Amino acid sequence: MWLKPEEVLLKNALKLWLMERSNDYFVLQRRRGYGEEGGGGLTGLLVGTLDSVLDSTAKVAPFRILHQTPDSQVYLSIACGANREEIMKHWDWLEQNIMKTLPVFDSNEDITNFVQGKIRGLIAEEGKHSFAKEDDPEKFREALLKFEKCFGLPEQEKLVTYYSCSYWKGRVPCQGWLYLSTNFLSFYSFLLGSEIKLIISWDAISKLEKISNVILTESIHVCSQGESHYFSMFLHIDQTYLLMEQLANYAIKRLFDKETFDDDPVLDDPLQITKRGLEDRAHSEQFNAFFRLPKEETLKEVHECSLWVPFSRFNAHGKMCISENYICFTSQDGNLCNVIIPFREVLAIDKTNDSSKSVIISIKGKTAFRFSEVKDFEQLVAKLRLKCGAASTQYHDISTEVIIYGSERMLPDYFNHRIIGALVDQAVFEELIRDHLPQLTEHITDMTFFSSVSLSWFLTLFISVLPIESAVNVVDCFFYDGIKAILQLGLAILDYNLDKLLACKDDAEAVTALNRFFDSVTNKDSPLPSTLQQGSNVSDEKSSHIRVDITDLIRESNEKYGSIHCEDIHSMRCRSRLYVIQTLEETTKQNVLRVVSQDVKLSLHELDELYVIFKKELFFSYYWCLSYPVLKHHDPSLPYLEQYQIDCQQFRVLYHFLSPWAHSENRDSLALWTFRLLDENSDCLINFKEFSSAIDIMYNGSFTEKLKLLFKLHIPPAYTEVKFKDPSKGDELSEEELLYFSQLHVSKPANEKEAGSVKSSPEKGKGKVDIQAYISQWQDELFKKEDNIKDLPRMNQSQFIQFSKTLYNLFHGDPEEESLYQAIAVVTSLLLRMEEVGRKLHSPTSSAKGLSGTVCASGGPSEGKTESSLDKDPSLLKEEPQWSFAFEQILASLLNEPALVRFFEKPIDVKAKIENAKTSQLCSRTKM
């Protein structure tokens, strides 16, 4: 295949390559170890072994063609081939079509330029046809099956394309396959029994860049959640990087940048993403950036041609690019001339009858452009005439177009809630400072200084810092050259003040120096008298700067930094956008964690891990369900705690992963009740603070806090609150009421002799406790949280039955399961007896004897039963009056059972729970 011409140092290359054929201008080489008997000796064996380890589509092609210029050690690689037959086709084409033309050139430089132009034309032609067809369906199907088998992702995950490459694990390259799908970058390698499996979601990538260093000639660096990953040995690294960049930016916009995403209908359906579509979109973006066109323009056709340049009086070779509304041309070097012709300005399109194959485009103002050497120029003329005819019949609201054009195109995403566009350009500016003013970055190591200082420059186009008579010139340059003019001027200002900035000891001095400089800028062409110009009125005491004219400053910025191209800025913007949005998200996360950490016992690290799981569950729901409404609630303008919220279904999934009570048979009911409890505003959504508060109680709560949570889960929110006298507040209690409270801690005696015992330790759960001692203990231990528990409603009989069943389910599988079941039976019986005592105090005719006897006769869980007879015989509830329990009664009764206390207070391995949730979260999606 033809390759983009790149320099090769032949002296070093001879160690790995052998000469097959050569002439005055080209060299055909074969890689050592291929086609040689014995493998070409030790060198050939090493080279062949290295290449054979690599996959056939990623290894270095065994044949290549170089273009040489006489008396030069630098050669250009222009073609490669997987076999001799393929490379010979390229060699024969060069001999038949190029060799006869080269001798007519006078200089080696002209020869090289001609060869480069022809090779680039061939590549463009091949690329144009490659877009018209997809990958080999059979090969793609095989790759898809392997992708699904290796990673086990949901079947809705759409594979876009795949490449063979090497993943660097430390300093060792591991050959394998890189899969690019809608939501993930995945890599798989299995070599010599060692398996590597890597899955990175696009929304987790904060940096994506092409790099080159001593070890890696050219590789792709991916940074995700603080970890760096390196991929190299691509056959088409530029194409791979382009698609990776498109997918990463697509995910970032879809998940984090809702405002931009909603304005781009092309991004609406992730299931429609294709390799060809991404390539076309990337080329259109580059086309729009280069010619500074509206982002809605789509590149339709590209034609190699030459444009007659009257001021230079020769034909400039380049490309004609055609979109829906524009005809554009750029010379081959990109600097000689660029032309932008709106179709609405075209009056006529003609063709010549001579052999020049020329197309003449006449526009308003009696100007004509002549494009010659156009392939298929007759068909092109017909197409352009149709477009011009359609453009002439369309009505254009120029004023509206100018407003829209100036704001989708010149300052994209500048004036949304998070001013993402301005922050992106700050990052671009920092990168340019590092490249062009390294001595300044060495002195001011904190790059955030430049961002904080220059943010107002970009947001106001220097109007906020320059005198108005000078700022208008900057605005003129901006409307002509776009953000490029602002970046160049910013660099020129820093360069002009370089010595003063290097002498500054801190940021405050640097800001003062720059402000004084801005005050000294004048405009000699201003219509205002010099006495009225702001820059001229600055006193010598206030500014030590010599006055500088804005025209000179702008000219200097173009002379020094005119090499910065619009397409370079577009590329830097794409790279920086990932970093900027991820930084904003990280800042938001840290703010959330700081707020939440004040109310929970979980550590910051544990909260951080929980937040990742929380947000990932939110995103997973949106990955494969286009109509999922949750992310529609994401509004960056809301307080950061409210920006991301999950619904009941998502909470259920997380509850199954994280709750220590998720093994219960009624775990779905518990999840539903917990969500209902947390959703205080009844909008069917909960935020991270609410979510983490529940998890914190389950992990780190005391016995009382955990029991209170379970108690509240079984009480509907609308339940009427009931209060009763509180002995801790000194309420006067009658002797009968005092007996009632004392019975809260009475347990069932183990035998008749023990029943006569008067006093024993509460922790052992045997015998009766001294009444006054118990009340004192109750005051000390329980009413420390009286503000939280005193207003809890009472639990009625049906709720209490469900509460008891929940406790039974929680104990299933526990080592102390038998003793826990027995303890619950004892507590249930005790509470019913206490209710009977209390009822007699207030209504002597009432009795709960039937209920008490029924519960005591249920046999308890020692017989393996998990349901009380209350649940089995509902008629009992109808026969007896309604009864209820206060939270304090249930708590005090359960406290008397050591097995129950140990169950709720035993430590939970939070780290293991979180790690298991992280590994299981994605896998669970394949089963849904």
Image: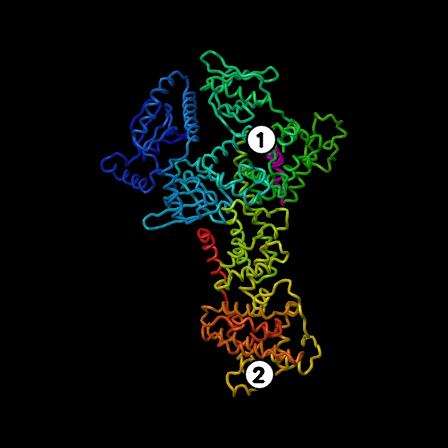
| Picture quadrant of residue 19 | top left
Q: Can the viewer see residue 564 in this picture? A: no
In the rendered view, does 176 fall on the left or right side of 565?
left
Q: Position of residue 427 (x, y in %)?
A: 57, 40
Can you give x and y, in whole percent of width and height, for residue 37 in the image?
22, 35
**Residue 35, x across and y down, in percent:** 26, 34
**Residue pushed farthest top?**
354
Q: Residue at x 53, y 36 (%)?
A: 266
Quadrant occupied by the N terminus: top left
Q: Secondary structure at mark 2?
A: loop
Residue 489: in magenta span: yes
| Label number found at residue 768 | 2
Q: Amino acid at mark 1?
A: Pro
Verify whether residue 525 appears in magenta: no
Q: Nearer the viewer, residue 884 or 539?
A: 884
Task: Examine the rendering and report whether any part of residue 436 can be seen.
Answer: yes
Label 1: how many Cα within 10 Å (few below 14, some 14–19, many 20+): some
Which three-letter amino acid code belongs to the residue tagged 2?
Lys
Magenta span of residues? 486-506
Q: Are marks 1 and 2 in contact (CB under 8 Å)?
A: no
Q: What colour scheme has been applied to the protein in the rendered image?
A: rainbow
Instruction: Using the image as rendered, state which of residue 129 and residue 337 is in the foreground.
Output: 129
On the image, the x and y values in percent for residue 358 come to: 48, 15
Q: Main secondary structure of the magenta part?
A: helix
Compute the Cα span from label 1 to label 2: 85 Å
Q: Is residue 641 above or below residue 7?
A: below
Instruction: Count all numbered tags in the image, as a single digit.
Output: 2
In the image, which is nearer the foreground, mark 1 or mark 2?
Answer: 2
Residue bearing mark 1: 294
